[in-house]
Amino acid sequence: MHIHLSSPWFAPRAVVARYRCVILLLAAARLLPAAEPLSLQALPGGVAAVELAIESKAMGEAMPALVLLPPSYAQRPAARYPVLYLLHCAGGDYRMWAQGTGLIRELASRELIVVCPEGTPQGWFLDSPVRPRSAVETHLVRELIPRIDREFRTLAARSGRAIGGFSMGGHGAITLAAKHPDLFASASSFGGILDLPRWPGQWGLDAVLGPLATNREAWIAQSAMGLAGRFAKEAAGMKLLIDCGLDDFALPENRAFHQRLGVLGVPHVYRERAGGHRLDYYSRHLPAHLDFHLAALSEAASAPPAGAPATGYFTHPAFLKHRTGEGHPERPERLTAIETALKQKGLWDRLAHPVPAPASLATLQLVHTADYIATARRDIEAGRTTLSTGDTTVSPESWDAALLAAGAVCDAVDAVLTGKLRNAFCAVRPPGHHACPARGMGFCVFNNIAIGARHALRARGLDRVLVIDWDVHHGNGTQDAFWTDPAVLQFHTQERGIYPGSGKEGERGAGAAEGRILNFPLERGSGIEVFAKLYTERLAPAARAFKPQLILVSAGYDSHADDPLGGLALRSEDFGRLTRIVLDLADELCQGRVVIALEGGYDLNALGASAAATIAELESRSRAVQIKARTPSQPATTTEQPMEKTR
Ligand SMILES: [Zn+2]
């Protein structure tokens, strides 16, 4: 070892005394013959130890490893656990972490399996380019980890694996995380040797990498410093904790690595504390490292895995440029209010954010007449402030916004039908449900939800689409668009006697579509109990009889009690309840396919909270499906605030 290290891994006497029984048990465990059935050794605090001996092709010999199981492991036979791989220093071995670091004591209160592999004194946790049979990296990645996942109830996924280590082990943790981002979600280093070319002639590095003078490239390529760029690319998103004592001889390279990550824009946690390159220092800070990994893994497990169906949030900056003038209730701030509410509830980062494309003229014509489309375009391009067909305020940017609003719903329908997303919310402006085939009105230019429904039927080959409209105003444009189309079942609730005046009980559709339209005008002051009764007693049976392949919702939040334009009495959380009923129907009838598009809602606070309540239900349903698909049982992990964060 380096001159600064006077047996740095050697446990202080007091700690040895305290854990003498542990050490004895571990010593006894080592005497177990290799490849025997698992033999549990009981340790203080209910922790159990298992010593493995793995016949290693990579190393050409049996490689030991120590597995430490938390107390709950035996008590919860169905639970699966995250795993932290803890790597030893060049002077230590696989028993190092269990001897006098306080690890056993800390593990007694945590839901985590710790695996301590053997790295050999000078193996450096890499595959040596010059020394055959020195392939600790291959041993860990191809032999040890699969064995652990086979023999223990691990989560067996990236989001369930972390790696950490001290000194040579710190180097090992950071480099293995950089090289195998598919295996680990977080990595931490105590006093890591992070820049190998600083240390020619030390700790067997020349033997494992060849002389620095002739093999400099290999030294750099195997260094945390040389691999740092990977954390900005292949290993982006890895949670990193770099920790070094202020008297540690490795402090300069730890500071340099911290700076390098900063230059690369890689988020990480960096800590410096009083102390040297000694295991007792790291023992003091071990609890913080364990909690760092538990928090990182908890976060990784709850984030939607790349490519898995999640909830999409479709919006576009162009929607903010559709200007309606001073004092108009349908204003750009509505979308900002929703975004703010989502961020405050921590939902924003859990959503997929696809960028919608504008609808083509052919797509608009699925619902609207060519004459009306031309009229709307002419009105907007001529600089009119109101459509000539009705009470829809426009500005020069409204044409682009209107095409994108319809396009967003079509894109959301496509993403949900192809399984790219589980469900979606379209935060669009201008709204759509008053726009009729031949005229815009009621703040609406094109009927986004109707276009989305026809797109699903005509372009995607569906036979049956259910449209639900909970806006306080009747969706007259949607009703008109499908008045004689039996492929669409409509369920409308609206306040009786207000704009636009349609939506009476007797309006039921015509011809083959007679009975496909369900209208429920509600008395002023009606609240969630009225809605919930209609949704369960009228909507649900009609939906079951119709068997929709997709459910679309015209989500107007002007049915909120605080809305200045409506007289119904829903509260923000009630929209979550309605969304749950819709999602239950979708799960039962059409593989959970739901696309929701914003219509009205003019009290900014009510709108933000209500839309967030809707989206929270969409998101939690997507996540439940992902977790169900990933693992049958997942233990809760404790999350603590990380230490000082830095970039
Ligand atoms: Zn409305």
Image (cartoon, rainbow, N blue to C red):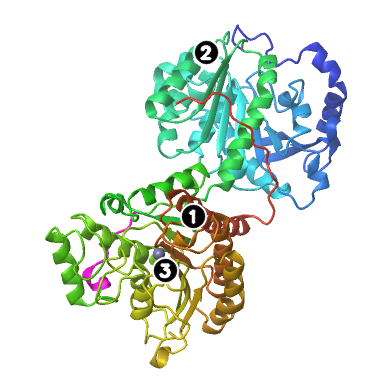
Q: Position of residue 272 (x, y in %)?
A: 56, 15
Mark 3 or mark 1, which is nearer the start of the sequence? 3
Main SS type for the magenta part?
A: loop
Q: Amino acid at mark 2?
A: Leu
Q: Quadrant of ligand 1?
A: bottom left
Q: Position of residue 407 (x, y in %)?
A: 31, 63
Q: CA distance from mark 1 to mark 3?
A: 15 Å
Confirm or reject: label 1 Cβ below 8 Å from ligand 1: no
Q: Amino acid at mark 3?
A: His
Which residue lies under the disc numbered 2? Answer: 251
Residue lying farthest to the bottom in this orientation: 511
Q: Which mark is residue 482?
A: none
- Kindly identify the residue that appears in the image at 73 percent across and 35 percent down: 110
Q: Nearer the viewer, residue 408 or 40?
A: 408
In this rendering, the answer to whether 287 lies above or below 70 is: above
Which residue lies under the disc numbered 1? Answer: 562
- Numbered range of the magenta stretch: 355-364
- Kindly identify the residue that appears in the image at 63 percent across and 20 percent down: 90
Q: Answer with the quarter of the image where residue 392 lies.
A: bottom left
Mark 2 or mark 1, which is nearer the start of the sequence? 2
In this rendering, the answer to whether 98 lies above or below 310 is: above
In this rendering, the answer to whether 599 lies above or below 178 is: below
Which residue lies under the disc numbered 3? Answer: 473
Q: Nearer the viewer, residue 523 or 144?
A: 523
Task: State the SS at label 3.
Answer: loop
Task: Look at the image and tell me in which quarter the N terminus lies.
Answer: top right
Tell me if I can see residue 142 in this picture: no
